Image (cartoon, rainbow, N blue to C red):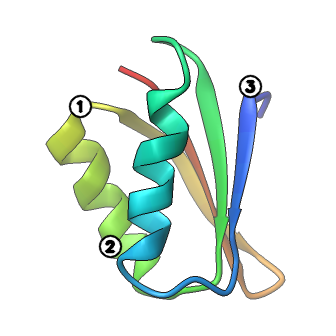
């Protein structure tokens, strides 16, 4: 999937992946896609809840090489 910006949250524990994702999205315009890579297993539930609460769309989530990858579309 194509994306406009990437944020690597590897090594960060809850709640930092969400906090930093929120900050990264703030610098983007509506419709742009942010790719987030995280290592915290809790980020799977957290990212889905974050997207629902903020109105940003969680387009896709997957795991690659023990990392979790999320694609969020800025509302």
Q: Residue at x 22, y 38 (%)?
A: 54
Disc 2 to disc 1, C-alpha distance: 16 Å
Residue 56 x, y percent position in the rendering: 34, 32
Q: Residue at x 16, y 45 (%)?
A: 53
Mark 1 Cα within 10 Å, few/some/many (few <14, many 20+)?
few
Q: Along the horizontal axis of the image, is 10 left or right of 50?
A: right
- Pointer 2 with pointer 3, Cβ within 8 A: no
State which tag comes first along the sequence, 2 or 1. Answer: 2
Q: For the residue labelled by badge 1, is the local secondary structure a helix, a strand or a loop?
A: loop
Residue position marked by numbered label 2 in the rendering: 45
Contact? badges 2 and 1 (CB < 8 Å)? no
Q: Horizontal and vertical percent for residue 6?
A: 74, 44
Quadrant of the snapshot with the C terminus: top left
The reply to whether dot 1 and dot 3 touch (C-beta < 8 Å) is no
Does label 2 or label 3 sit earlier along the sequence? Answer: 3
Identify the residue position indicated by label 1 in the image: 55
For the N terminus, the quadrant is: top right
């Amino acid at each position: 999937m194509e994306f406009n910006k990437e944020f690597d949250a590897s090594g960060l524990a809850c709640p930092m992946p969400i906090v930093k994702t929120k900050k990264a999205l703030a610098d983007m315009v509506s419709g742009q896609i942010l790719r987030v890579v995280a290592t915290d297993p809790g980020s799977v539930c957290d990212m889905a809840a974050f997207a629902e609460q903020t109105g940003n769309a969680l387009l896709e989530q997957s795991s690659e090489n023990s990392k979790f990858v999320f694609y969020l579309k800025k509302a």
